[in-house]
Image: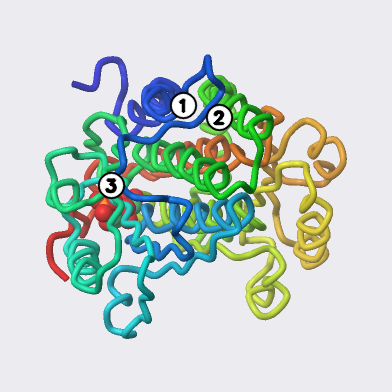
Amino acid sequence: EKGNYRHFMQKEIFEQPTVVAQTLSSYVRPLEQKVALPQIDFDISAINRVTIVACGTSYYAGMVAKYWFEQFARVPVDIDFASEFRYREPVLEKGGLALFISQSGETADTLAALRHCKAEGQTIAVVVNVPTSSMAREADLLLPTHAGPEIGVASTKAFTCQLAVLAALAAHFAARKGRIDAAEEAEIVRYLLEAPACLNGALQHDDEIAAMAHLIAPARDVLYLGRGPDFPLALEGALKLKEISYIHAEGYAAGEMKHGPIALIDEAVPVIVLAPSGPLFEKTVSNMQEVRARGGQIVLISDAQGLEEAGEGCMATIEMPKVHPLIAPLVYAVPVQLLAYHTACVKGTDVDQPRNLAKSVTVE
Ligand code: F6R
């Protein structure tokens, strides 16, 4: 049931504050200021390597998690597209954790990779939205997202719920490995619990983004740039735009632009820059200036401070709430989802059922 919404995708984007809060409620204990995982019967502090495998949007959630696991828990992380994973004959050391991320829990490549890792003696953890799915059944450690059924083919709320679980998992690792103390864990818990309100703040820009979509809809190509944990968000933004509006889009690590893709820049190519203020901000802004010097039309997504510093001369800006870098990827998912959604609406495409795509990909 779509209720008052035009599309399931739109409804699911707007459900995010609620479903992220719902998901977090099983991973954090607000009173004790601790993260809490479902009952597990193995020693997480003994895990020295994590291998993440997923497809599509779930893969991008995994890319964000790699930054978190390495930064907070100092655990090395390998990540692969499920379709590539087995065929490169990965080296899986004893005692590793293999982590699979999937909305449906049925994606054929991801499931095959899971079975491969199980046969290789890895501990199997899954972040999955469908609790009755094959992946959920075959896991040693089941980490459900509580996004509720996702009907729109383009994944939205499942993604932010995956990020919420992965952030809690990273914090749990960090705490068990003694990389953060109780005060730091409490701080992370506080930031995580702020996420639903920040998502709400991001959703307030819906009308503005709907107007902006008219600037994006005529484009043939669009670029998305981000750094650090916001680089996967650039990839996710490009994927969302491609799949529902059929505009060619690419996501790039902001610093990688000048190594080739900058040759594409002219007045006809909108460049969406995801740059929360913080330690990487200045670097991203200087990459943005390189684009601007070549006539690129920029949409800057940042907080008030970032827009104040670098918003001038942009084709458009979108102001996000000021958030801790840990939850920025969750919050910045909203404007890229809305931009893709409204651009598709301007173009009149079938938003919930884009051509050539299926909700669950059960062939390899
Ligand atoms: C993008 C999208 C797909 C899925 C991918 C993996 O919007 O929906 O890229 O993310 O097919 O699906 P799951 O997460 O079900 O394994």
Q: How far separated are the C-alphas under marks 2 and 3?
A: 22 Å
The residue labelled by disc 1 is 28
Q: Is residue 332 left or right of residue 315?
A: left
In the structure shown, which secondary structural element does the residue marked by tag 3 occupy?
strand
The residue labelled by disc 3 is 141
Residue 164 % position (x, y): 46, 37
Mark 2 vs 1, N-terminal side: 1
Q: Is residue 48 left or right of residue 108?
A: right
Mark 2 vs 3, N-terminal side: 3
Mark 1 vs 3, N-terminal side: 1
Q: Amino acid at mark 2?
A: Leu
Disc 2 to disc 1: CB gap under 8 Å = yes
Ligand 1 within 8 Å of the CB at mark 3: no
In depth, the one of 213 and 181 nearer the eye is: 181
Q: Is residue 253 left or right of residue 125?
A: right
The residue labelled by disc 2 is 192
- Seen in the picture, residue 167 relative to 90 is either above or below; the reply is above
Q: Nearer the viewer, mark 2 or mark 1?
A: 1
Residue 151 occupies which quadrant of the picture?
top left
Ligand 1 within 8 Å of the CB at mark 1: no
The residue positioned 78% from the left and 50% from the top of the image is 281
| Residue 214 appearing in the image | no
Label 2 crowd bin: few (<14), some (14–19), many (20+), radius 10 Å: many
The residue positioned 25% from the left and 36% from the top of the image is 150
Q: Nearer the viewer, mark 2 or mark 3?
A: 3
